[in-house]
Structure formats: structure tokens, C-alpha cells
Image (cartoon, rainbow, N blue to C red):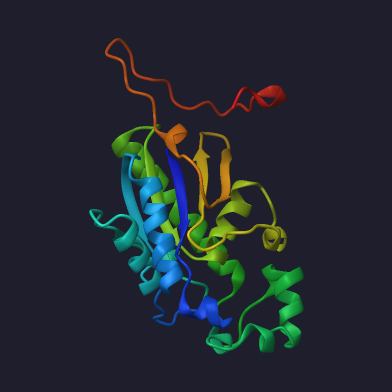
Amino acid sequence: MATLLLLRHGRTTSNAAGTLAGRQPIALDEAGEAQARAVGERLAALPLAAVVSSPLARCRQTLSLALPQARPAVDERFTECGYGDWTGRPLKELAKDPLWKVVQAHPSAVTFPGGEAMAAMAARGVAAVREWDATVTAERGPDALWLACSHGDVIKAIVADAMGLHLDQFQRIVADPASLTVIRYTATRPFVVRLNDTGGDLASLVPPKKTRRRRNPAPSSDAAVGGGAG
């Protein structure tokens, strides 16, 4: 199966102000624009077979700055969680709401008032990843790389699934603005290759060149005993 790069959008005016953006049409601030350009420099050498985006402006703006030559496909399933009545409110204020503690400790039980269940958010995000990964693999081969630009909670939910964690443990995962998280899917299990990566060389992700004598084998589903040489 192919390898997925999950990119969180750059910092927004809402992030800087400490409010919950939700599905509002929030733009990147100057720091977020710089983050997007910087991650674009890191991604430039990668042969991306597909680029997919949340429909929200901050993800599309991030990709326009990071990968200006790309023509991202838009998939609604990568959109932000529907926070309903919480949307646009200060995080400090929301932290006093009794639901806040449930979001922290038992998110699988949460449905935001007037909004979406966190379990539904996780299910649609994971379903989108699995479907896109199968499509990219079928069209471009098991060593293909593809990228999806999404939001913090959606990315954390996808990572939790890849790690075999219950959704109630996904708050242990961090996905900073403009970070990259890399997941390599195989026939029997995913491998989380990088998590919340905000700097460094991505050259190790470039697939090996195919030989004329035989095709490169599909990535193994086996884990290296002892940790391997990587």
C-alpha cells in the first residue's frame, strides 16, 4: 500500500487569538503563511502521486503556498470537526464548560451541541484515508507517496487508528500547525513513520528507483525485530 503524508494547515488568525475556528472561513496569519512556504520547501523533492485537501480555506491556502503547482482534490471527509455551538468561542471560555472534560477524557462519547460526534469525525477521516490510499496504490503502485491536508483533530484521529488506539486516547497525540505525520500502510498493518514533524529532511521518504529486471517488492507488513537499522 502507499504512504500517506498528513499535513496540518499553517497557523491561523483563530489559532493566534485562542478561539475555536471550526468550519469558519479562517485564513492563515503571517506566521502560518511562513510555515506553509517552509513545509513546501521540504516537500518539493517528493514525487507526490496525489494531493487531497479539506475544503476549508486554511487548508487550501496552505497548499497554495506550499505546493503552488499542485491541483488538490477536495474531499469533504477531511474537513474540520463540526463543533456546532462551540465554534468561534474562546478556548479559555470553553474550558469551563462541563463538556470540556468529556472531550479530554472520553471523546468517543462527545457530540458537540448543534454539531458533530467526534466518533463520526474519526470514522469519516479514516474511511477517506483508506479509500484514497487504495486508489493511489492501484494507480501508482505500493511505493507511491500522497498527501492530505487536514485539521488537528482529524489528523489525530487518523493517527490513533493507525496506532491501534481507541479514540479516547487520541488526545495524547499532537499535530502542530504545518506539521507532517507520515503513515505507511501495508496489507496487514499501518506503520507510523513520522509524527508531528515540523523540520528536517524528507529525502528518506522518496521511493527507490524501479529496476528493469524486476519490480521493487511491496513494502513488508512485518516489523523489524529490535527496531531495525532505520
Instruction: Give me the residue at 34% from left, 40% from top.
Output: 45
Identity of the residue drawn at 68% across and 68% down:
108
Quadrant where the C terminus lies? top right
Q: Nearer the viewer, residue 47 or 188?
A: 47
Please say if 12 is above or below 68.
Answer: below
* One can see residue 79 in this view: no
Left or right: 172 as drawn, with respect to 79: right
Q: Position of residue 213 (x, y in %)?
A: 30, 10
Q: Residue at x 56, y 44 (%)?
A: 194
Residue 44 picture quarter: top left
* Number of marks in picture: 0
Question: What residue appears at the point 49 percent right and 66 percent down from the top-left corner?
Answer: 151
Q: Is residue 165 above or below residue 100?
A: above
Q: Is residue 47 visible?
A: yes
Q: Is residue 21 left or right of residue 54?
A: right
Q: Looking at the image, which is closer to me, 156 or 66? A: 66
In percent of width and height, residue 131 lies at 41, 50
Q: Where 160 falls versus 55 (above or below)?
A: above
Front one among 66 and 129: 66
